[in-house]
Amino acid sequence: MWSRRSVVERLRWIAALGAGVPAVVLLTGALYSDAGVRGGRYGQAILLALVHGLLLWVVFRLARAERVPRMVIGATLAVACLGPMTIGHAMGYGDLRSLAHTLVREDASGRYPAEWKRLDRDALFPKWVGAITGTEVGGIRGYLRAQAAIGWEGWVAIKYRMHVERRGPWVWVAWAWHLALFLVASAVAFLAARRESPAAGTVVEARPAPRPAPPPAVPVRDDREMWSEVNEQQRTMASFYRQPRAAFPSLQDFFEARVRRSFARIDPEHREADVRSYLERVCVMQEVSRAELVGLIARHASWARPPRVPDDVRAVVLARDEPRVKEVVWETADDYWAMVWSRDDG
C-alpha cells in the first residue's frame, strides 16, 4: 500500500508534468513556428532554447524531479525535446499549404496550369510541391522538401531587404541544430532542477566522520524491548525503546538506527536522502542533564510505565523538542534508551 506521503508526491509530479510540460511545449513550439521553421538566425534559436530550458526548470522543480520515476522522466524529456519542433513544423505545414493555395489561385503570370485553381488544398499541395522540387509528393514529407527548396528567409540589416539565407541541405543542418539545442536545454533543465539544496537560512552542522563498524567477532543478540501507552483523556502516547549497548558503538548510532528503521517503508532510492534530511533539519540533538531527563519523563509520561533512570546515567540527548513531539535518548552502563512522546491535536 502507498503511504499518504507517497500519494501526495505522485499527485504532485503528475499534476506538474501533466500540465506544465505541454504548456511549455505549446508556447515554445508556437514561437519556433514563427522564428525557427522558415527564418531567423542561430542567435534567435539559442535564445528560444534558453527560454524553453528556463520554463522547463520551473516545471521540474515544482514536480520534484528527483522523485519522478526514470521511465517517466525519459518520456518527459523526449516530449520536451521533440515537442517544440513537432508543433512548429505542424503549424508551418498548415501555413505552407495556405501559401501554396493562395499563390496558385491568385497567380496571373501563367506559372501554374489553369485547372489547378479549381483544386482544394489537399489535392493542390502535392502538385505545387512537384512544381517547386521536381518531385510530386504531399504530406509532411512534401512540406519539408518544399521548405528546404524555398530556402531560409533572412534580413540584410543595412538595407532592410529580405533575401534567401540558406537553402537545400543547409536548411536541414539548421533544423538539426535546433533539435540539438532543445535536447540540451531540456536535459540541463532536468539536471539543474533535481539538485536539492538546504532551504534558505538553514544551517547544516558538519557531520562527524562515520565510525567504523564493530568487528563481527561476537554476534549480538537482538533483544530490543518496546512498549507504548496511550492516555485517551489527553490524546497523547508515550513509547519507550531499549537496546543493549553492545548492539551499537555509540548513542548517536543507536538513534540513527531508529531513524532508519522508521524510514524503512520509503523508496530505497531516496531513503538515504530522507534520513539525512530528517537528522539535519528536524532533530536538535541537544545534550541535557539527568535532571532534565527525569523532568521530561515526569511531565510527558507520568501516567505510563517509564523505566527507572539510574543515578550514573552516562549521556542524555534531546533529539526532538516540538509542541506535539518530544524525543529523548540516553545511555546507561548496560543499555541505550529512547522515549518518544506525541500528542494528537486532530
Image (cartoon, rainbow, N blue to C red):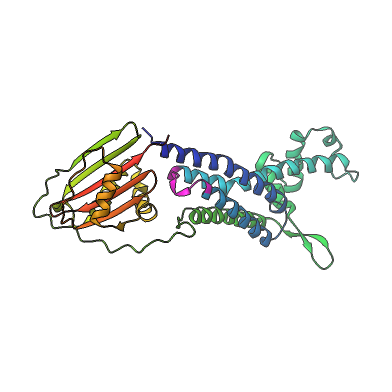
Q: Work out whether residue 84 or residue 56 is closer to the camera in this orientation and state it.
A: 56
Write the start and end of the magenta stretch as one range.
62-71
Q: Answer with left or right where residue 68 lies relative to residue 175.
A: left
Q: Position of residue 215 (x, y in %)?
A: 13, 58
Residue 68 lies in the magenta-colored region: yes
Query: Farthest bottom residue?
Result: 158
Q: Position of residue 263 (x, y in %)?
A: 32, 44
Q: Work out whether residue 192 or residue 84 is closer to the camera in this orientation and state it.
A: 192
Q: Is residue 303 above or below residue 328?
A: above
Q: Position of residue 103 (x, y in %)?
A: 83, 43
Classify residue 141 by image quadrant.
top right
Q: Work out whether residue 232 or residue 207 is closer to the camera in this orientation and state it.
A: 232
Q: For the image shown, how many numbered marks are present on the structure?
A: 0
Q: Answer with left or right where residue 222 lies relative to residue 75.
A: left
Q: Answer with left or right where residue 244 lies relative to residue 93.
A: left
Q: Work out whether residue 238 or residue 28 is closer to the camera in this orientation and state it.
A: 238
Query: Farthest right residue?
Result: 108
Residue 95 lies in the magenta-colored region: no
Quadrant in the picture for the N terminus: top left
Q: What residue is shown at x 64% (from left), y 57% (from top)?
A: 174
Q: Answer with left or right where residue 61 lies relative to residue 315.
A: right
Classify residue 299 by image quadrant.
top left
Query: Farthest left residue?
Result: 218
Q: Is residue 36 above or below residue 128?
A: below
Overall secondary structure of the magenta stretch? helix
Q: What residue is shown at x 68% (from left), y 50% (from top)?
A: 32
Q: Position of residue 105 (x, y in %)?
A: 86, 39
Q: What residue is shown at x 66% (from left), y 47% (from top)?
A: 27
Quadrant in the picture for the C terminus: top left
